[in-house]
Amino acid sequence: MESKGIMDNFLTKGTWVRGFYMVLFVVFYSITEILVTAVVVFQFLHVLFTGRQNERLLSFGNSLSIYVYEMMSFFTYNSEGKPFPFGEWPADEASSEGTD
């Protein structure tokens, strides 16, 4: 098997395109951190004032955590699939399975 030289690696267009997407997803990740914080605060306040969890926030929080996982998988080269908005928004798997 023939190995590529460093210059070949630098000239590979696919690597630079992936790098661009990675930088873009770092921006999305920063926005996601703010959203996660908001979900945590609102869920806590909802439980504090009503004594129960907000089902819509549970669903959104679960989807958001799956989205973060998808971004991390892309960042670490464990996935080639691009997360939302270039792929589908992750479904809340817990809601689709039903809860007890």
Image (cartoon, grey):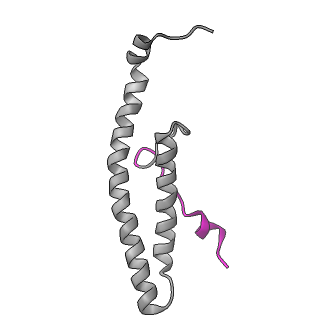
Residue 98 is one of the magenta-drawn residues: yes
Relative to 6, say whether 91 is above or below: below
Is 99 left or right of 92, judged from the image as shown? right
* Image point (55%, 64%), residue name: 92
Is 49 left or right of 81, judged from the image as shown? left
What range of the chain is rendered magenta? 85-100
Counting from the top left corner in percent of width and height, residue 65 is at 49, 60
Quick one: 94 or 51, which is closer to the camera?
51
Counting from the top left corner in percent of width and height, residue 24 is at 33, 42
Quick one: 55 or 79, which is closer to the camera?
79
The answer to whether residue 89 of the structure is visible from this angle is no
* Image point (36%, 46%), residue name: 26
* Residue 94, quarter of the rendered image: bottom right
The answer to whether residue 37 of the structure is visible from this angle is yes
Counting from the top left corner in percent of width and height, residue 90 is at 51, 56
Quick one: 93 or 33, which is closer to the camera?
33
Magenta: main secondary structure equals loop
* Image point (50%, 73%), residue name: 58
Residue 72 is one of the magenta-drawn residues: no
* Residue 35, quarter of the rendered image: bottom left
Quick one: 41 or 83, which is closer to the camera?
41
Which residue reaches farthest top?
Answer: 2
- Rendered-image quadrant of the N terminus: top right
Relative to 56, say whether 93 is above or below: above
